Image (cartoon, rainbow, N blue to C red):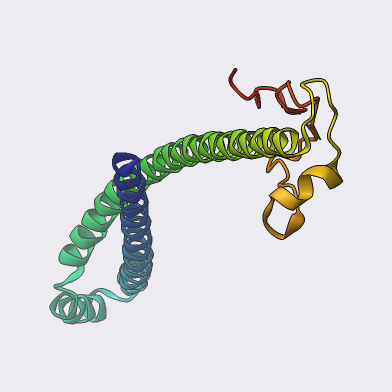
Amino acid sequence: MKLKKWVLWLLVVTFLASEVLLFSALRQKAALQVSLQSQTQKADQLQTQVNELKSLNAEAQGVEVARLRAENQDLPRLRNQVTQLQVANQKLSSQLKDTSTYAQQAQAQLAQVAAARQAEVQRVNAEAEHDACINNLRQIDAAKQQWALEKNKTAEAMPTVQDLAPYFKDGVIPACPSGGTYTLNAAGYLPACSVAGHILPQ
C-alpha cells in the first residue's frame, strides 16, 4: 500500500514536471517565432532597399550601394541567424511533440493507478463491512443465548426484537453496515444477514 502511494506521488511529480517542461518549451518557441519574424522582416526591408537602388543611375547607384553596403554589413549575419532560428524552431517542435506524448503517457498511468487504488479502497471497505456484520451477528447470537438462558426457553423458541433489545447498548440491535436485513431465527439457530457472504461461522 505504501509502495503504491509512493508510485502515485512519483507519477504526479513526473506529470507536473512534464507540464512545466511543456510550458517552458512553448514560451521558448513563441519567443523564437517573434524573433524570427522580426529578423525576417528586417532582412526583407533591406533587400527591398537594395533592389530600389538598382534603378538609380550608375553614379548615384554606386554611391548609394557603397553606403548601403557599409550600413548593411549585418545582412549575412542576420540571414544566418534566421537559418539558425528555423533549425531551432524545428528542434523545439520535435521536443514539444515528445513532451506531449510523454505527458499523455503519464496521464494514462495516473488513471490506471487511480483506478487500482479505488478498487483497493472498495475491497477494503467491503471487508470492513463484512467483519462488522459478522461481529453484529455474534452479538445477536449471544443475546439470544442469554435470553433463552434467563427465560428458560427451548432451542425452538423464537425471540423478538423487543426480547433482545435489553441486551444491547441503548436497547438498539445493531444494523448491517452494508444495508442487509437481519433474521433473528430461533434460539437454537444462528441469526442470518440478507447480504451474500455475511454468514456467521458455525
State the image coordinates of residue 84 (x, y, percent, origin top left): 21, 55
Q: Between residues 17 and 179, which one lies in front from this camera angle?
A: 179
Please tell me in which quadrant of the rendered image residue 181 appears.
Answer: top right
Q: Is residue 85 left or right of residue 125?
A: left
Disc count in the image? 0
- Is residue 98 shown above or below 77? above
Could you tell me which residue is drawn at 27 percent across and 47 percent down?
A: 91
Q: Is residue 35 left or right of residue 200?
A: left
State the image coordinates of residue 8 (x, y, percent, origin top left): 36, 46
User: Looking at the image, which residue sits at the far front?
Assistant: 152
Q: Between residues 68 and 150, which one lies in front from this camera angle?
A: 150
Q: Is residue 118 left or right of residue 133?
A: left
Could you tell me which residue is drawn at 61 percent across and 33 percent down?
A: 134
Q: Is residue 70 left or right of residue 158?
A: left
Could you tell me which residue is drawn at 24 percent across and 74 percent down?
A: 58
Quadrant into which the N terminus falls: top left
State the image coordinates of residue 20 (x, y, percent, origin top left): 34, 60
- Is residue 71 shown above or below 180? below
Please tell me in which quadrant of the rendered image residue 158 appears.
Answer: top right
Q: Between residues 6 and 122, which one lies in front from this camera angle?
A: 122
Quadrant into which the C terminus falls: top right
State the image coordinates of residue 162 (x, y, percent, origin top left): 85, 47
Please tell me in which quadrant of the rendered image residue 170 appears.
Answer: bottom right
